[in-house]
Amino acid sequence: MKADFKFLKLEIYGESHAPEIGVKIGGIPVGCELSLNRVENFLSRRRSVNGVWSTPRREEDAPIILSGLEKTETGYVVDGEINICIKNSNVRPSDYLDTAVVPRPSHADYAAFVRDGKISSGGGRFSGRMTAPLCIAGGIAQELLDSIGIRVCAYISSIGGVDGASYKTEESIALHGIDVETENRLKASAFALLDESVRPQMEERIRAAAADGDSVGGTVDCVVQGIDAGMLGDAMFDGLEGKIAYSVYAIPAVKGVEFGAGFDISKMRGSEANDEFVIRDGDVATATNNSGGINGGISNGMPLTLRAAFRPTPSIAAKQRSVDLEKCEECELNVKGRHDSCIVPRAVPCVESAVSLAILDEILALRDGIQLYE
Ligand SMILES: Cc1cc2nc3c(=O)[nH]c(=O)nc-3n(C[C@H](O)[C@H](O)[C@H](O)COP(=O)(O)O)c2cc1C
């Protein structure tokens, strides 16, 4: 799967039950120094854990550098297209014998069967597993963005109908972004919440759904700081919202993306929705941030805020109607296999990755360029 970015050449390869999956990243300037210090953090936040929300499928996810990075005394230096893979060591194709001809409702099985002539074991290239290489690329992108003062941070804003604190409820985040201490706490957590007091309620919703053989969805927010007014994006098809949404929609199970006040803005009057201009600390700023840091497709200097909606995990243990595609008969399906009862906590680094990659591509495409290394 190749991303249609401007400068970054991103390709994610492999399948859920293939011997390996990985990512090729071209377009990062040769000579650029990297420590890869973010990669393990991204992978560990995405990795399944002993949580009520998480699949019991455990994978070590140890990245193997195949090419494009030369080891130095202090880290690595880019010397071509980067290619990093991960071995799939914990696969159980036997769990997928039933779904070889009976598609799981709302997974990619049926659409892929029509396209490819078969349903691939474990969801094939449509599996959430493919977000592990996305997170490797995201970790690299975020290291480069860090070096030019752009900070990208995501967190859970709702699960199963339980809302958490968010840039929509905390004015200070919409106007000033996330402070470093909170960002570090979020990036150290497998269940990243601005206000952790709602965690028991969210976990209870997941537990109750799982007990019924069911699943729940939710939302992940992302806040980006350090993009100057006028720096990125342009009108219409070159707009920053479209670029970022394109990347975020690559994450399996994302069914909606909104910026700033998003769909709620449609219910406001102009006087409520408009972000009035003010002078803050000597600079032009806005009094509110309903636009999510973007006007006319161009960054306006305010924190960039967005929300992604995740569907409930499609693979559920409860009985569902499906069809036997071989016999062309309706049948009942009990999905087997190991599945997340809620995708949302593990999706947080995936959203950070998708957003970081889209922004890095915009940075690399800047005509006058930005020095990403000494
Ligand atoms: C981190 C992550 C983990 C996922 N885990 C599962 C899972 O365990 N079982 C499942 O059925 N879907 C899982 N998904 C979602 C499916 O891959 C996705 O719903 C499917 O490919 C269909 O794509 P769509 O929902 O975008 O239409 C996961 C997605 C992500 C991002």
Image (cartoon, helix red, strand yellow):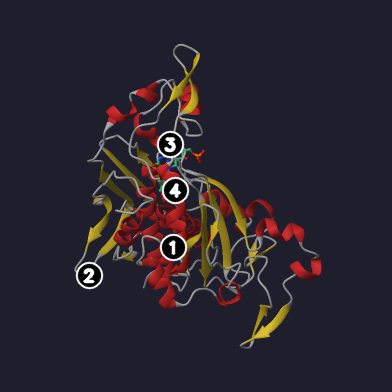
Question: Element under label 4?
Answer: helix
Three-letter residue code for mark 3: Ser
User: Disc 2 marks which residue?
Assistant: 74
Q: Nearer the viewer, mark 4 or mark 2?
A: 4
Three-letter residue code for mark 4: Ala
Q: Is mark 3 within 8 Å of ligand 1?
A: yes
Residue 199, label in figure = 1
User: Disc 4 marks which residue?
Assistant: 208
Quarter location, residue 57? top left
Separation of marks 1 and 4 at Cα, in angstroms: 14 Å
Separation of marks 1 and 3 at Cα, in angstroms: 24 Å
Cβ–Cβ under 8 Å for marks 4 and 3: no
Residue under the point 60% across and 58% down: 240
The spot of residue 53 in percent (x, y) is 39, 50
**Mark 4 Cα shell of 10 Å, populated few (<14), some (14-19), many (≥20):** few
The spot of residue 272 in percent (x, y) is 77, 69
